[in-house]
Image (cartoon, rainbow, N blue to C red):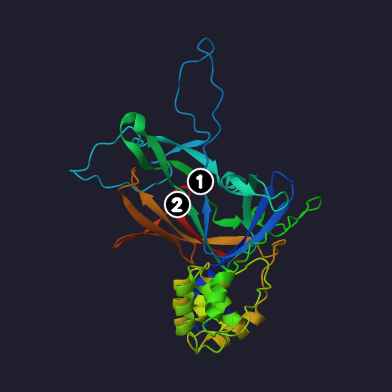
Amino acid sequence: AISRDAKQFSNTPGNSDLTKLFEFASEEKTIDAQSKQVGYKVQPGQTFLQVPIPKLAEPPQQSNSSKKEEGPAVATGTSSSEEIGEPKEKKSKTAPSSSSATAPAGAKMEIVDYKACFKRMLEAYILQGYTSPVTQQKGVAYRSSRMRTFPQYLFIQMLRFEQVDLTKEGKGFQIQKIRRMANMPVELDIEMLASTGLQKGETALPKAKKPKPEAKPEIIAAVTNMGFSKNAGIRAALATQNAGAEQAVNWVLMHSQDADVNDPIQDNDDDEEEVDAGKVSQVAGMGFNQKHAIKALKATDGDVARAIEWLFSRAGQLDDDSSNEQKKKKIEPGPNTDSPRYKIMGFISHIGERATSGHYVCHILKDNGKWVLYNDNKVTYCEKPPLGLGYIYLYRRV
């Protein structure tokens, strides 16, 4: 089914790049606490939706005088591993005994509504040391994220492992498994995760301008004194990050045959994704033209070595890729109008109490509506799959 859907994508040659089916763009919202203005930015190329599993609110405690005699464990908001059909981990004879952080077999687990997990994911977090584009002062900002597009296939990763501080017990920091259920539905609607874009009453933040690197005049002079042009001196100074006159002169000698060595440095008109001119010169110095160098640096987060590797791996395809890029419309911040309805295809769960041991199994929903459990070479039908204990879920949009 996935291979068939891949053929619907014009930018997917055959079935070779199936990742496009899982990709979505997120919309990042930043609120500047100083100016109260709001900025939106789209982050494309996401493949996993990471969802936390929050704790339930603590119930109010009764006083000793009003506390009644304890009865059976309350079923509301909790369930045991036996009740939910969780597969049992085979105990090794040499395995260590359960620690105090490990839930005993049959222990009650909190049941968290999956919508509560999504709400926690949407909550803003604090950015300390944020430089306001309005005041140019460091302060605080609040950042949150929503989905700008919905993919054909959606991977959801439940954050079932957390780092806990056990230094008081002499155990340091340890990774522990979160023993809480998040009952994911077979049919899922994620409209609550859709992006909105700039809302009524919000004022857009001005785009932050990165300071452009400038070539040192003394380095330019050293290059021109050797008989080279001023533009060559500027390129050499930026390419060597103003390291010194000797380095710049050596750079010019190595690149004196480059077709653009005497051309002026072109300003990048893309306000949102400015590229360091010095890095552009470094990449272009390997024999690539400036347009391709800028594209490669954008694709590799400004890493020169990765950009060069990126270009070499696409030799002969760059012009075709650039024509395809022109056909593709850049995703801007705004409301997500994609269909938010999905149906589950399967999920992977972890058997075991500890994060450092255990076993992974997979449940698949077949076309006939029956669940099948894949446990290594053992394949069986499963009447009651533990939908609340999944670690990775795969949904298909309907």
How far across and down, in percent of the image, does residue 42 sit? 64, 62
Q: Residue 377 carries which label?
A: none
- Are discs 1 and 2 less than 8 Å apart at CB? yes
In the rendered view, tell whether residue 318 sits above or below residue 117: below
Could you give the CA–CA distance between mark 1 and mark 2, rounded to whole angstroms? 8 Å
Q: Residue at x 66, y 60 (%)?
A: 41
In the rendered view, tell whether residue 112 sits above or below residue 239: above
Residue farthest to the left? 94
Say whether disc 1 or disc 2 marks the residue closer to the N-terminus: 1
Which is more toward the observer, 193 or 140?
Answer: 140
The residue at which mark 2 appears reads as 390
Q: Could you tell me which secondary element the residue under label 2 belongs to?
A: strand
Position of the C terminus by quadrant: bottom right
Crowding around mark 1 (Cα neighbors within 10 Å: few <14, some 14 to 19, many 20+) is many
Q: Residue at x 52, y 36 (%)?
A: 77
How far across and down, in percent of the image, does residue 5 sit? 54, 76
Seen in the image, is 106 located left or right of residue 280?
A: left
The answer to whether residue 314 is seen in the rendering is no
The residue at which mark 1 appears reads as 182
Locate residue 66: give its quadrant: top right
